[in-house]
Image (cartoon, rainbow, N blue to C red):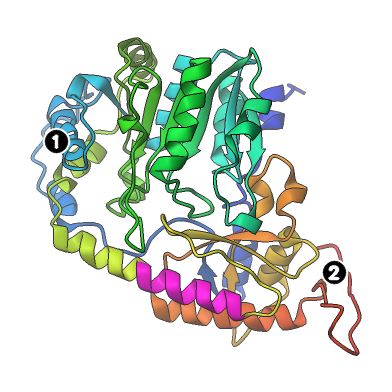
Amino acid sequence: MPFISERGKKIPASPIRKLVPFADAAKKRGVKVYHLNIGQPDIKTPEIAIEAIQNTKLKVIEYSPSNGFLSYRQKLASYYKSVGIEVNENEMIITTGGSEAVLFAFLSCINPGEEVIIPEPYYANYNGFAIQTGVVVKPIVSSIKNDFALPAIEEFEKIITPKTRGIMICNPNNPTGYLYSKEELEKLAILIKKYDLYLFADEVYREFCYDGEKHFSAMNLKGLEQNVILLDSVSKRYSMCGVRIGVVISHNCDVINTAMRFAQARLCPPTFGQIASEAAIDTSKEYFTEVYNEYIERRNFMVNELNKMHGVYCPMPKGAFYAVASFPVDNADKFCEWLLTSFNYNNQTLMMAPASGFYSNPLLGANECRLAYVLKIDDLRNAMQVLAEALKVYPGKIIDKKEKNTEFKIAPKP
């Protein structure tokens, strides 16, 4: 029988999607499942983007240029200028989602066996991209104890080796919702300069910054014009994850020229996705105001409800639409599976993403889960009620020693 590649054996299952079969089975049993596991907003896509696709009069759906339609790149450059980022249409490659942007960046800048440092917990698919490209991820732990702030620069420097080629950040962060400040990034910039590293900046969630906080782009770090690689996507900005359009941007022409060859090898990004994305740039400010206010309401409600639950702690995220919470359970993976296989409250349950999949060492996230507040308030209210009731009866709940007449119970293996 033909063998499976070592790369194939190493690539991890997604913590965001691996429990889908259990959710599907629950739905077949008639149980309502609230999906807090995935960043799929229920916010409507801007009508202007939908109409652009519906009104397309193409007679032939041809290949686009490998770096994307010129008209889209020019319009995209104007969008970046509007948010204080000066780039031109020749400093970007349009990609098939933000995922391909990460792949092109890794392939263009890092040799197999060389390293990139990433604060963890980090977006789980970075692991998959690293394995596909032969890049070695060197994690550096951020902790829920200080709300996932950027680790001390001295800690970064301790793990830099001759094989280190870059540092990667996601700002605002997925999965934690932490927003790195200008001051934190400027400290990181000193290290980038000192060792002449790349700074891979995933800024997909830049529009989602709360409590008066402002997003500071890594592209605006002085003296790093040749070091910063910006990774972006339209998926969350316009709530159109399915169009699969992203971009890799750099002032470093060698990086862009190299990425272009990888882009040519895969031919071109999706035509209809680019049409929708180009149109979406004209989305009204009123749309973003409504979306912003909606996420603030959802965030405040969900995080406050979580922190009311005995033994649960959830930092208040400053950006994106995710939060990581710690739970009084023996194992978050088992708890999330149990919610889908063995529990319902009023014929309802919820799906979360176990945080173990966002760490290089699963034990670090053994009692943490990521929750995405992408559902309307009524659904979030029901989901939080279900979660509160579940924690009361979960067999593997860790009982506070101060509670009387209780015993610690070990959850059965699922």
Instruction: Write down the residue under mark 1.
Output: 78
Q: Label 2 is placed on what type of residue?
A: Ala
Instruction: Write down the residue under mark 2.
Output: 411
* 67 or 294: nearer the viewer: 294
Residue 172, percent from left and from top = 43, 48
Which stretch appears magenta?
A: 296-308
- Structural crowding at the residue carrying mark 1, measured as other residues with C-alpha within 10 Å and reported as few (<14), some (14–19) or many (≥20): some
Q: Which mark is residue 289?
A: none
Residue 105, percent from left and from top = 44, 23
Q: Please state if 161 lies on the left or on the right of 51 as rendered.
A: right
* 130 or 140: nearer the viewer: 140
* 59 or 324: nearer the viewer: 324
SS category of the residue bearing label 2: loop
Q: Label 1 is placed on what type of residue?
A: Ser
- Quadrant of the frame with the N terminus: top right
Where is 76 relative to 36, above or below?
Answer: above
- Structural crowding at the residue carrying mark 2, measured as other residues with C-alpha within 10 Å and reported as few (<14), some (14–19) or many (≥20): some
Residue 177, percent from left and from top = 48, 55
Q: Main secondary structure of the magenta part?
A: helix
Q: Please state if 239 lies on the left or on the right of 87 as rendered.
A: right
Q: Mark 1 vs mark 2: which is more N-terminal?
A: 1
SS category of the residue bearing label 1: helix
Q: Is residue 243 magenta?
A: no
